[in-house]
Amino acid sequence: MDFKYFSKNGVALPLAEAVVPLSNIEYQYGFGVYENVRVVRGRPLFLDDHVERLEESARIIGLEHPFESTAIHHSVDELIAKNEIDTANLKLLLLGGRSEAEASLFILPLNPLFPDKKIYRDGVLLVSHQYERLFPHAKTLNMLGSFLAYRKAKAADAYDALLIDRQGFVTEGTRTNFFALKGKTIYSPPESEILLGVTRKYVLEAAHRSGFALEERKITLADLKEYDAAFITSTSSKILPVRQIDDASVDVSAPALRELMTAFDDFLQKTT
């Protein structure tokens, strides 16, 4: 879709004006936070959660700003209407300034990149990469480590890189949350050490409704042979089965995994 407008500080402007000056030192140093919101049939999914996390990310890194959540909601709705959006991703980009008044909020419409349908059947390849994000609960612009990990994944023709902490435990992907599965118990890396994904939240809600249990557990790559399956989640991908991590194969046909995928698809259908 050819979008014509973006939003800056609550004002819809021509997309050609969506620029950040090279002299912006806060942007250069990554003093900002962001969210990606999926729009389906003109409706922004889970917008309350995304705005809440945007504000929490800003709080964690000390980014003061004047933007109220109700105003952000209004800007999103206005931008969707202005561009006549049916399906898209919206990037909410909150940049810090030297003072609260100098902070800026950009909302940019983007064409979504959805995974090929066959990988929901066949699963995805992941590569491991040792890296720990500085602020696990904040979605910040400090992305160099994740960028290098993701570049490693792309060079290996993998879907994402799975981040490993200094003790050798799996935390998350560069843009995904990670889970292992045994029977109808879902195992997640400790929530204190990962970004609490919005899609992750609703996958777990759908899972609970379908009789799945959740357990937080530190997981190493060597532990994966003890589980029936593994999967990742994100805004654009929903639930993706994992077929391989580095050289280790993972089963993608576990009945409980397929049940969970169906349960979440059904959940989204009712939500949208």
Image: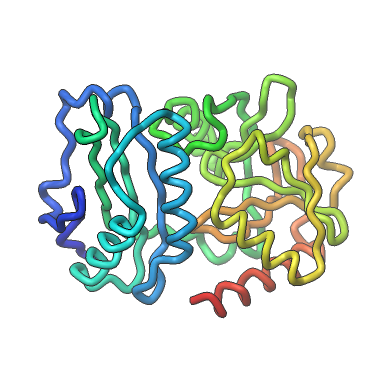
Q: Is residue 21 left or right of residue 79?
A: left
Q: Quadrant of residue 206?
A: bottom right
For the point 83% across and 56% down, the residue is 185
Residue 43, horizontal then vertical, whole percent: 38, 72
For the point 53% across and 75% down, the residue is 271
User: What is the quadrant of the N terminus in the image?
Assistant: bottom left
Q: Tell which of 214 and 238 is nearer to you.
A: 214
Residue 6, horizontal then vertical, whole percent: 20, 55
Q: Quadrant of residue 89?
A: bottom left
Residue 245, horizontal then vertical, whole percent: 69, 40
- Protein image colouring: rainbow
For the point 28% across and 57% down, the residue is 71
Q: Is residue 22 above or below residue 113?
A: above
For the point 15% across and 58% down, the residue is 12
Q: Is residue 127 visible?
A: no
Q: Is residue 245 visible?
A: yes
Residue 28, horizontal then vertical, whole percent: 27, 24
Q: Tell which of 257 and 108 is nearer to you.
A: 108
Q: Is residue 269 above or below residue 80?
A: below
Question: Residue most toward the bottom?
Answer: 270
Count of numbered marks: 0
Q: Is residue 209 above or below residue 227?
A: below
Q: Tell which of 75 and 148 is nearer to you.
A: 75
Q: Is residue 88 left or right of residue 157?
A: left
